[in-house]
Each structure stands twice: as structure tokens, then as C-alpha cells.
Image (cartoon, grey):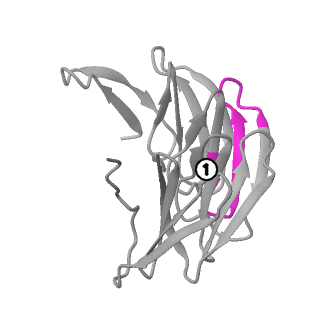
């Protein structure tokens, strides 16, 4: 209870644990020796720990994380179900920028080059600059977004009505849309060959 345990993936041996206050609300993001997770209410804390010592490196506050966090170089990017995408310095926890999506973030963000791609509940995908948090593009769809994924030089998104759309992740231009004709609540999967 109130512990996140680590295991050696090759041997299955225990590699220790970290105590947390509240339950982990997101998966762990591990970058080099840093592990980041979000703990649930009442505190809604973003916690960064050294995976070798278990010691807290830094912590911050985040409201209702929308899936997992991602990194890009030394930046940690977190989306909130409440409708914001925030970029932190991975090593210090200092906030670099924050972007309001004007809708609920429905899934984890993904990064393509210097663009953060964030699905939003009102049928939008927003492209945000990794560097400064400015909006690069907005792609509008007829239904709320479920998730998106980037493979090679294309991004694919699926909405809750089951429409799959391919788009250019650098500028948001639509390449094609194909209906699945079934409600969809998960990420698209694609063969990259």
C-alpha cells in the first residue's frame, strides 16, 4: 500500500520501492535516473525521484493528469484533464510554459520533432511548440478525440465515433479520414512497414 515497486525486467528480482502519498494516478516515466509520476487526490502532486536512491528530486502540483507524461530532451510535458498542457524542466521542476487547450485533454500528448500533439475532447487536436508553448496548429474533427499516435512522418488520430484520420504532425494538414463505424475509445495501432 502506498508503494510503487520496481523490478529488474530481465530477472524479475525486486529493485526496491518508493513510498508515495496517495495512489499513483499515472504510469511512471523513467528518463535516465529520474522517475516521474502523479499521485492522486487530495494532493494531486507531480513527483520526481531518483530511481537509485528513492529520494525526491522535486515535486509540483498538477490537476487531474490525462494519461502519461512524455519527455523531449530535458523537458517533461504533462497534460491535464482540466485542459492544460504544461512543460517543466525535467531536472529542476521549473515550469517552462503552459498552454490552455480550451477543452479537456483526453489522452497523453505525443511529440513529433518540435511539436507537442494534444488530443482535446471537443474534436480538436492541438499542435504546440515544444520550445515556447505557442500554438502551431489546430485540427478540428466532428467528434471528441480519443487518442493519437505518431509513426514515422505521419500522425494518426481516432475519435470516439470511430473515425481514423491521418495528418501531417508538423503542420496539422489532413491526409485522409476513414470511418471504422464502431465507437472507439483507445489509441490507433499501425504497422510501420
Q: Which residue is drawn at 55% across and 41% down?
A: 70
Q: Is residue 40 left or right of residue 118?
A: left
- In reply to whether residue 35 is colored magenta, the answer given is no
Secondary structure beneath dot 1 equals loop
Residue 51: x %, y % from top left? 46, 21
The residue to which callout 1 is attached is: 44
Residue 95: x %, y % from top left? 77, 38
- In reply to whether residue 80 is colored magenta, the answer given is yes
Using the image, determine if residue 57 lies above or below residue 113. Answer: above
Using the image, determine if residue 162 lies above or below residue 149. Answer: below
Q: Is residue 138 visible?
A: yes
Residue 89: x %, y % from top left? 71, 30
Q: Can residue 100 be seen in this view?
A: no
- Tell me the magenta residue range: 78-95
Looking at the image, the residue that sits furthest to the left is 11
Q: Which residue is drawn at 48% across and 20% down?
A: 54
Amino acid at each position: 500500500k502506498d508503494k510503487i515497486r520496481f523490478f529488474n525486467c530481465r530477472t524479475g528480482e525486486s529493485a526496491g520501492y518508493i513510498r508515495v502519498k496517495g495512489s499513483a494516478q499515472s504510469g511512471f516515466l523513467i528518463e535516465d535516473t529520474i522517475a516521474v509520476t502523479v499521485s492522486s487526490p487530495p494532493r494531486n502532486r507531480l513527483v520526481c525521484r531518483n530511481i537509485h536512491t528513492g529520494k525526491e528530486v522535486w515535486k509540483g502540483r498538477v490537476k487531474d493528469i490525462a494519461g502519461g507524461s512524455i519527455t523531449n530532451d530535458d523537458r517533461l510535458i504533462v497534460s491535464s484533464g482540466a485542459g492544460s498542457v504544461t512543460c517543466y524542466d525535467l531536472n529542476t521542476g521549473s515550469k517552462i510554459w503552459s498552454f490552455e487547450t480550451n477543452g479537456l485533454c483526453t489522452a497523453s500528448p505525443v511529440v513529433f520533432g518540435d511539436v507537442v500533439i494534444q488530443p482535446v475532447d471537443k474534436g480538436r487536436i492541438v499542435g504546440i511548440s515544444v520550445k515556447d508553448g505557442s500554438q502551431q496548429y489546430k485540427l478540428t474533427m466532428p467528434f471528441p478525440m480519443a487518442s493519437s499516435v505518431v509513426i514515422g512522418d505521419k500522425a494518426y488520430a481516432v475519435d470516439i465515433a470511430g473515425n481514423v484520420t491521418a495528418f501531417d504532425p508538423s503542420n496539422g494538414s489532413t491526409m485522409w479520414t476513414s470511418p471504422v463505424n464502431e465507437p472507439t475509445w483507445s489509441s490507433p495501432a499501425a504497422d510501420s512497414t
